[in-house]
Image (cartoon, grey):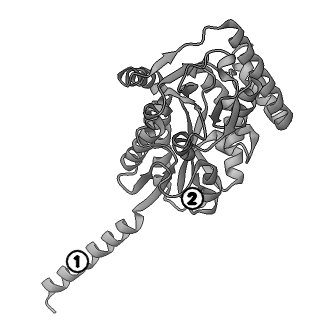
Amino acid sequence: MSRLNTTSLLSLLTASILAGNAAAQAVTLNLSNEYAANSIHGVGDASFAEAVAEETGGEVEIIVHYGGALGYKSADHFDAVGEGALEIANTFGGALGGLDPLFLVSSLPFLVTTVEDARLLYQASEERFREIFDDGDQILLYASPWPPSGLWGRKPMNNRDSLQGVKIRTYDRNGTIALNILGANAITMSWADVVPAISTGAIDAVLSSAEGGVSSSFGDYFNSYTEIYNYAIPLNFVHMNRVIFNDLTESQQEGIMRAAARVNEVIWAAIPDRLEATYQQLADQNITVVASDNEEFRVALQEAGETTLLEWLAVTGEDGQSIIDAFEASRGE
C-alpha cells in the first residue's frame, strides 16, 4: 500500500473513531408530564429541553411526552423514575402526598396567597424534598408553581351555600378535607381523569387554577371560574433518575443543572404574565370570572384551612412544624 493510501486510511479510521465517540456521548432522555403542552409546566418542559440542548452543546436531548402520553400519571412518576422506567418526570406535588405528606405543604389552603410567599415556603421545605427524592434514587432538578387555585363550574361558588353537595374534584387530600368541611362532596382525582369525569357528569366542578382549566379546554363544559382568595399555589417537581444522571459526563450533568436553574427562574417569574394572558382567554371564551367578596365565606374558608393545617401537622409531626416555623421566620413573623 502506498504511503499516501496508508495516510488516507489512518485519517479515515481516526475520523471514524472520533465520530463513534461523539455518538456514544449523545444521550436521549424521556420526560413524562401528565399535563398539556400549553400548560405552564408543559411550556416549562419544552423550555427545559431546549435549555439542556444549549447547555450541553447538543449532547443531551430531552424528549417531552405531554398529557400522560407514556401511560404514567403523576402518582406513578416517583416509582417509575426511581426504578429507571422513566429518566425524568414533571410531577404534581399533591400526587406525591401518599408517598410523604410533606409534599402537601404547598397546597395547604390559604397558607400562602402570593407567589412571593409560595417561594419562601418552598425554600423552607426544599432541603427535605431533596432528601426524599435522594432516598428514592432520584435527583430533584427544580420545583415551580402553578398560578393560584380557584373553582371551575357551571355556576358561581362564592358563598358557602353554593358549595353544598357539589361534586368537586380536588387535587389532593388537603382540598378534599377543606371543601368537605364547607359542605361540598369533594373527591381527590388525578388530572388525567378530570375531563372524562366532567363529560360524564361524575363531577360538577373542579378545584384548579384558571390556567389549568384553560389549557385543558374546561370552557367546553363550564362557564364560570370563581376566585377563592388565592386558595393555594401548589408546586410541580421535575426529578431525574440518579443512576442515569450519574452515568452522564460531568459536563453533561453540569449542563442539565444549569438548564434547570435557568428554567426554574423563568417559570416563577412568569406567573403574573401567565395570569394576565389566561384571564384574557377567559374573556375571549365568555367564561365569567367571579370574585369572592362574602366575609362570612372568607371566614369559613380560613377556618377550613386552619383545620386542614392542623390535620397536616398531626401527620407530619416535627418535620411539618419545622417547615412552617422556617417559613414564618422567613416572613418575619
Of 289 and 106, the residue lying toward us: 289
Where residue 62 appears, x then y in whole percent? 42, 53
Q: Is residue 54 visible?
A: yes
Position of 12 relative to 309 (above/below): below
> Is 321 positioned to the left or the right of 90 in the image?
right
Q: Residue at x 69, y 19 (%)?
A: 330
What label sits on residue 246 in the rendered view?
A: 2
Picture coordinates of residue 92, whole percent (x, y): 59, 41
Q: Is residue 70 above or below residue 182?
A: below
The numbered dot on residue 223 is none
Q: Secondary structure at mark 2?
A: helix
Residue position marked by numbered label 1 in the rendering: 12
Quadrant (top left, top right, bottom left, bottom right) of the N terminus? bottom left
Residue drawn at x 65%, y 8% as measured from the top left: 294
Q: Are marks 1 and 2 in contact (CB under 8 Å)?
A: no
Q: Quadrant of residue 20?
A: bottom left
